Image: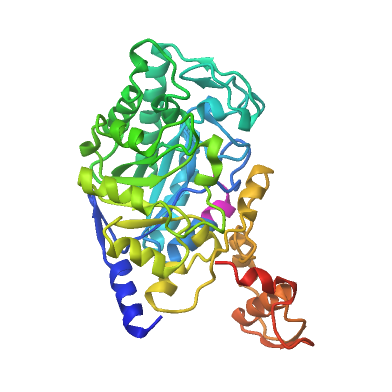
Amino acid sequence: MTSAQATDVQTLLGAPLQIGPLQLRNRFVAAPMERNYCTEDGSVTDQYVAYLAARAAGGAALVHTEAGYVRADGKGRQRQLALDDDRYLPGLRALADAVHDRGAYLGMELNHGGRTTQQAVSGHRPVAPSPIPCAVTGGGIPSELDAPGVRALARAYGDAARRCREAGVDVLTIHAGHGYLIHQFLSKATNHRTDEFADPTLFLRLVIDAVMHEAGPDQAVGLRISAHEGHDAGLSADETFDLMKSVPLGRLHFLDISAGSYEAGEWIVQPGEWKPGILAPYAERYRAAFGLPVGVAGRINTPEAAAQILSSGQADFVSLARTLHADPAFPHRVLSAAPYRPCIACNLCIDELHQGRPIGCSVNADAGREHLRRASQRRRGKARVLVVGAGLAGLETARLLAERGHDVEVVESADRVGGAFRLAAGLR
């Protein structure tokens, strides 16, 4: 990248952005990403606080947690963040305080898993618009919600929004994509009702009512959607767009565009061979039609890809999950034209998520270990260290030691560094 190109990138991505009552300091948003960093009852841990604090310190303007479940029967993973009880407020406040202390806003994604949940995980039989099982998560047949039950669930979103407001959360994102409960009402594949909730957008409209009623005047409220479901039986891009025309989006402050469902998970978490920014053309359509600030996700792992999306008018901000998992300081590094650690979309993080383990990262050994590193940095003293071998482990060891102020020398018998990991370094 030339110096002129770097300046253009910095200008685009470093510009502030107004979303509702809030002004973001730049265009980098840490997207919601499940991490398995909570306790099994959904409580926030020191690990979670330190992880989000690092992303805020790294320069993101808005840092989201993962999708938090608004009611106990909506819990999808053993260590998912809970929003269904006031006893979780102290942990949520700790997250907000840590992010605020580092100059960023905290965002919370409100969600219910619907048919994607499992009784073995939540302790409750799954509920859904229609009794259609989700084979991807085990195939249990969910109970069909009756109309009063649907309305009660909409109120649960409002209750969660109230807790978030009391905890100091700045941004509420209603999750209406990825095959979760709201998306199940929207989709012709999963909503086979004949009552009033056969109207695919009614439940979403009730959720917006409930959340907006509880949101404070200083909070921004937005909507995350899947631009399409990604499989033949689901909603196409045109069908989704037409549905959104009947949703009161003007009451909201922003949209965030993703894609996919559980039956097409590759659209939710794109593989490494897919084009960076692959979802940006879908976002452009919403930005032009609805007059709201629009963000977009989808394998945006380089400054050039992010800047192209903004300069072309496809979106107003970029939603980065794995990119900031790999390098929490990606925003600061981009805005100062410094080298950064790229996400290679190997999806180790996703593999570990599905196995119930706290997620790590192939290229960032510190990911999820920020709370441990903080303790090690308190140690005093300086040493001279010889690291034998310039493979991935040797280089990372040398880097960490040097960061802690030690004198480090690395020796390698081969004519190139990287060891057995050199092949992966070419993947972008």
Q: Is residue 19 left or right of residue 353?
A: left
Asked whether 48 falls inside the magenta stretch, the response is yes
The C terminus lies in quadrant: bottom right
- Residue 82 position within the rendered picture, expressed as x and y whole percent measured from the top left: 51, 36
* Residues rendered magenta in the picture: 44-49
Q: In this view, does 273 lie to the left or right of 191?
A: right
Secondary structure of the magenta portion, mostly? helix
Most foreground residue, 242 or 177: 242
Q: Is residue 200 left or right of residue 398?
A: left
Name above or below for residue 412 compared with residue 133.
Answer: below
Q: Residue at x 70, y 73 (%)?
A: 392
Asked whether 328 falls inside the magenta stretch, the response is no
Q: Colour mode?
A: rainbow
The quarter of the displayed image where residue 289 is located: top left
Name above or below for residue 178 compared with residue 3.
Answer: above
- Residue 338 position within the rendered picture, expressed as x and y whole percent measured from the top left: 45, 79
Q: Residue at x 61, y 46 (%)?
A: 36
- Residue 227 position within the rendered picture, expressed as x and y whole percent measured from the top left: 38, 41
Q: Residue at x 37, y 46 (%)?
A: 257
Most foreground residue, 2 or 122: 2
The mark tally for this picture is 0
The N terminus lies in quadrant: bottom left
- Residue 276 position within the rendered picture, expressed as x and y whole percent measured from the top left: 46, 60
